[in-house]
Amino acid sequence: MTPAMLLWLALTYAQIALAAAGCLATVRMIIGPRAQDRVLALDGLYITTMLLFVVTGMRLGTPFLFEAALVIAVAGFVATVSLAKFLLRGEVIE
């Protein structure tokens, strides 16, 4: 097997594994018994989505998906901080 073929297979496997992880995080977000479980599942979902964009960008060779992954990372961080603040204090804006 050539190195290019191994890289293609590795990226394919990574995409499949990340898609499965995203599906499991979505299921956890839907059936989570507490709000904290749902916030953690949201963290996992945005991280797997960000990584899926990075792997797809590597596979296609386009820089657009890397920029989209950065936007997802920033939006996910802001969402996590605001949800954590809401769960602790009951309000987001003081």
Image: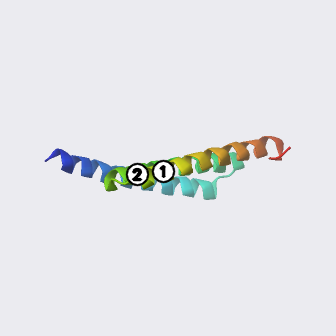
1 sits to left or right of 10: left
**Could you tell me residue 53's position as x and y percent?**
44, 53
Q: Which one is in front, 28 or 84?
A: 84
Tell me what residue is drawn at x 19 percent, y 50 percent.
5
Q: Which residue bears the numbered disc 2?
A: 63
Q: Position of residue 22 (x, y in %)?
A: 49, 54
**Extreme-left residue of the structure:** 1
- Percent across and percent down for residue 36 are 69, 45
SS at badge 1: helix
Disc tally is 2
| Residue at x 44% of width, y 49% of height | 66
Evaluate if marks 1 and 2 touch, with contact meaning CB atoms under 8 Å apart.
Answer: yes
Q: Residue at x 52, y 47 (%)?
A: 70
Mark seen at residue 7: none
Which scheme is used to colour this image of the protein? rainbow
Q: Is residue 20 left or right of residue 5?
A: right
Which residue position holds label 1? 67
Q: Amino acid at mark 2?
A: Pro
Q: Is residue 78 above or below residue 23?
A: above
**How dense is the environment of label 1, judged by Cα within 10 Å: few (below 14), some, or many (20 and up)?**
some
How far separated are the C-alphas under marks 1 and 2?
A: 7 Å
Kindly identify the residue that appears in the image at 77 percent across and 45 percent down.
Answer: 87
